[in-house]
Amino acid sequence: MAAADDAHLLERLLKGEQQAYKELVSTYQSAMRAVAYAIVGQRHADEVVQDAWLSVVRNLAKFEGRSSLKTWLLTITANAAKGRYKLNRREVLLDDLPSPHGTIGDDRFSPDDGHWAVAPYAWHQDTPEALLTEDELRDCLEHTLLSLSELQSSVLVLRERQGLALEEICNLLTLSLSNVRVLLHRARLKVFATVEHFEETGEC
Amino acid sequence: MLTCKEQVARSSDYLDGQLTFRERLMVRHHLMFCANCRRFIRQMRLMQATLKMMPDAPVKNVDALAQRLADERRKDRKDGK
């Protein structure tokens, strides 16, 4: 959302206009949930988002527009999450859970020369619209997203769906750039493997 | 020259603009000669665009939440905040 839109929405929010809150929640709740999910996990993500919303309303008059509204909301969410639950994820940070259709792993390449042993299958569809007309593929993708670790899934959502810069993800989740890069790459390869599997077999 | 396996390992960094100039040239060079890897990168981009376009799950109880937040704000406003 552009700065001018932010300013206009903010004005209506300050007045206490219910419709403006509805727009705010509909636009930003998914991104906020992804941040909360990454930090406190699935069990507490919803509570954290609720806390964050109340904190947003209480601090609304102090929002100065130095960052975008989205960045501000996500920072509040990250702080709400970190304040409430002690971060203890060193051991789960790079956990790599198995995914329904695997990944693009070492077994796809020849051990001798590193070339493809099983080349990438050519997908039938070449636009996202065409791919998404298949309801079954959509369900299949959702299933794969749920199979990812909480961090992998959140980093993927924040990057691909919310369009956040890598640095912004690092700051919100207090992760190093190299960890974010690893999380993102592993998540993408699993999603890739899911689409490939679906395109090849027609089933999930 | 990079192997396909090395190209795939660098693919996310390539797509995110995280490679150094030299690494980027190496990936481009590999892609120039390798149809399988070109297909891989093209389909990675397609996968990204597809994720982006997937519809959001609708927020539950959005009306109730919006009303609660609006009420909170009006209360603060009355208190002069």
Image (tube, coloured by chain):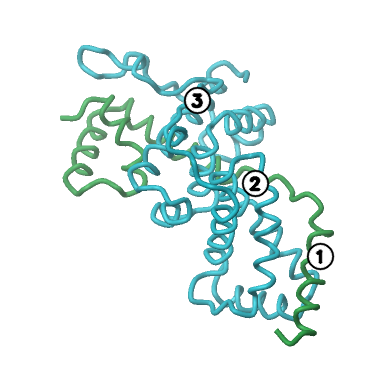
Chain colours: A cyan, B green
Query: How far apart in space, not on screen, are marks 3 and 2 (Cα)?
Result: 20 Å
Query: How far apart in space, not on screen, are marks 2 and 1 (Cα)?
Result: 19 Å
Q: Residue at x 26, y 34 (%)?
A: B31
- Identify which residue, A133 or B12, lies in the foreground: B12
Query: Residue A83 location, x and y as percent?
Result: 56, 56
Badge 1 amino acid = Arg
Q: Secondary structure at mark 2?
A: helix
Badge 3 amino acid = Leu
Q: In which quadrant is the C terminus of chain A drawn?
A: top right
Q: Residue at x 47, y 33 (%)?
A: A92
Pinpoint the chain carrying mark 2: A
Q: In which quadrant is the N terminus of chain A drawn?
A: bottom right
Q: Nearer the viewer, mark 3 or mark 2?
A: 2
Disc 2 crowd rating (10 Å Cα; few below 14, some 14-19, many 20+) is many
Q: Are marks 2 and 1 in contact (CB under 8 Å)?
A: no
Q: Is residue A196 left or right of residue B24?
A: right
Badge 2 amino acid = Ala
Query: Residue B60 location, x and y as percent?
Result: 78, 49
Q: How many numbered circles does the render carry?
A: 3
Residue tagged 3: A97
User: Looking at the rendered structure, which numbered label has been put on residue A45?
Assistant: 2
Query: How far apart in space, not on screen, are marks 1 and 3 (Cα)?
Result: 39 Å
Pinpoint the chain carrying mark 1: B
Disc 3 crowd rating (10 Å Cα; few below 14, some 14-19, many 20+) is few
Q: Is residue A145 left or right of residue A9?
A: left
Q: Residue at x 32, y 49 (%)?
A: B17
Residue tagged 1: B68
Q: Residue at x 37, y 37 (%)?
A: A182
- Identify which residue, B68 or B24, lies in the foreground: B68
Q: Secondary structure at mark 1?
A: helix
Q: Residue furthest front?
A: A86
